[in-house]
Structure formats: structure tokens, C-alpha cells
Image (spheres, grey):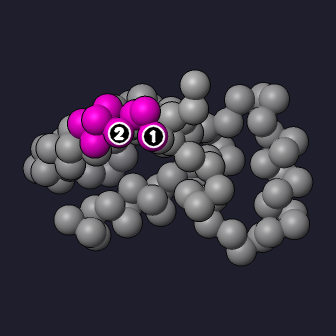
Amino acid sequence: SMERGQGIIDYFDKALGMMLLYEVERSAYKAYRSEHPNSKMSEVYGTAHLLRLLVKLPLLLSQAKMGSESIRALQPRIQELLRYLEVHSDRLLTK
């Protein structure tokens, strides 16, 4: 659903600076944030960073205060997103 998709985008925006950047990416991130403080990072950073979030998601969900029903409901959406990324990887990922 659109609501769950927005939830992943919101989570991405919050998680990017905390856990999804490599050390060499941090200075550019900080510079961009200072110049564009109201920008949504999901509009700046792309698929590679989203994949980093998806890799960390099982651990993050296990630490979250979510019930097992909520996590089970989220799993098909994550699988659907991963399938979409796989099908469109030639367009979404740079080589």
C-alpha cells in the first residue's frame, strides 16, 4: 500500500545519515544537508542506499517494538520491493 511505501521512505530519510553512508560519503552528505536542510534524502540518494537499508532491515525490525503480526505483514511488501528493484535494476543501479 501507499502508506507502507511512505513508511519505508520516511525510515530511509531518517536512517540515511545514521547508518547507511560509507565513511567517504559522510562529508558530502553533511555539506548537502547544511545547504539544503529541508530536502528529503530519499529524493537525493538512490537505489544503492535503499538496498543498504533493506540489508539492515531484518536486524532493525528485530530490535523494533513491532509485533510479529506487523512484521509478517511487512515481509511481502519488502519482497515485492526487492522484486521490483531486481526487475528494474538495469535502470535503477549505475554500473
Q: Which residue is mark 2?
A: 88
x 37%, y 66%: residue: 6
Q: Which residues are magenta?
A: 82-91
- CB under 8 Å between callouts 2 and 1? yes
Query: Could you tell whether 58 is left or right of 92 in the image?
Result: left
x 51%, y 52%: residue: 12
Q: Which residue is mark 1?
A: 91
Q: Is residue 62 visible?
A: no
Considering depth in this image, is 18 or 93 the residue closer to the camera? Answer: 93
Q: Residues within 10 Å of mark 1 (few under 14, many from 20)?
A: few
- Is residue 87 shown in magenta? yes
Query: Could you tell whether 36 is left or right of 38 in the image?
Result: right
Residue 69 percent coordinates (x, y): 11, 50
Give the CA distance from mark 2 to mark 1: 6 Å
- Badge 1 amino acid: Arg
Residue lying at the far bottom in this picture: please name it.
38
